[in-house]
Image: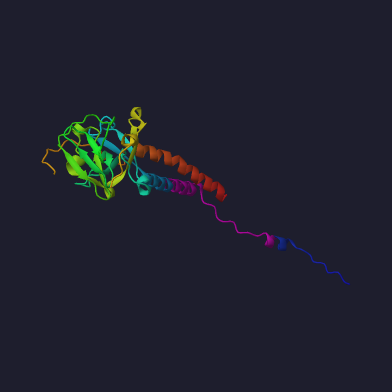
Amino acid sequence: MQNKHYSTTAGDISRDFAYEEKPRLSPTWQLIIDIGETLILTVVMFMVIRFAVQDFQVEGTSMLPTLQNNQFVLVDKLTYNFSQPQRGDVIVFEYPLDHTKNYIKRVIGLPGDHVTVNAAGIVRVNGKALSEPYVNDLDNFYGDRDVTLGANQYYVLGDNRGGSSDSREWGPVNKSEIIGKATLVYWPFSAFHFLPNEHSVFNGVPSSNTSSTISPLPNTTLQSQLDTPFSALTLFGALPVSAAIVRARKRTRR
């Protein structure tokens, strides 16, 4: 039997291992691309955070002593997509009579609740009188109030009852007007603290089964702007994270 010999030439080997090297970008163009990716990723991260959390600046004194004028608060905008507001929560909402304004108050009554406020300022929910340690005073210039809340309606009051325009004046807040739950004061940093929900004040409240002409009292409004400490912190925090992600992607590509 005749053996056949096959010879392998250098040309055959070179063809087997031949590859086409992609042209490399110049260092300048690579730097420009990396910066662009970092900036785009930073903006995306910033927008995602702003979608979930938003900061507002308090303007007014209707939530004293809980909130001071000019403080900045962070508002959780996602929680109420999965759960309902609870009595005692501090919420930010669109003013029912003008949706271009944002107010901050405390939830007192839930849908279906019967809420009364007497001339002395004592609040009753479904017949139970509340003892509210967070209230600045009980002054009630609006007189007796008696309301049964409908579906998706919330009764809200300011903690500074003698200096608050709230549901006693303009009625309940609809669920669709609620922006989110105020969770903490973050600025000035010396006043940094989480806002207690005060749910325990409403323990024992049973489950739920004529307006007067009054001069409006000063109210607490909120301003949401991009040039706030939270926005700056978010941007400066997202920037190094974005840069790290871009660097990791470069190492992976290599």
In the image, taking residue 66 as reference, residue 121 lies left or right, namely left
Decide whether the magenta segment is chiefly helix, strand or loop: helix
Residue 200 in percent (x, y) is at 34, 35
At x 36%, y 49%, the residue is 81
Q: Is residue 198 visible?
A: yes
Q: Is residue 221 visible?
A: no
At x 47%, y 43%, the residue is 243
Residue sitting at the far left = 213
**Quadrant of the drawing holding the N terminus:** bottom right
Task: Choose top left, top right, bottom left or bottom right for residue 221.
Answer: top left
At x 49%, y 46%, the residue is 246
Foreground pick, 187 / 11 = 187
Residue 161 in percent (x, y) is at 21, 33
Residue 5 in percent (x, y) is at 82, 67
Foreground pick, 100 / 163 = 163
Residue 222 in percent (x, y) is at 26, 39
Foreground pick, 156 / 51 = 156
In the rendered image of this protein, does residue 60 appear above or below residue 76?
A: above
Foreground pick, 180 / 46 = 180
User: Colour scheme in the image?
Assistant: rainbow
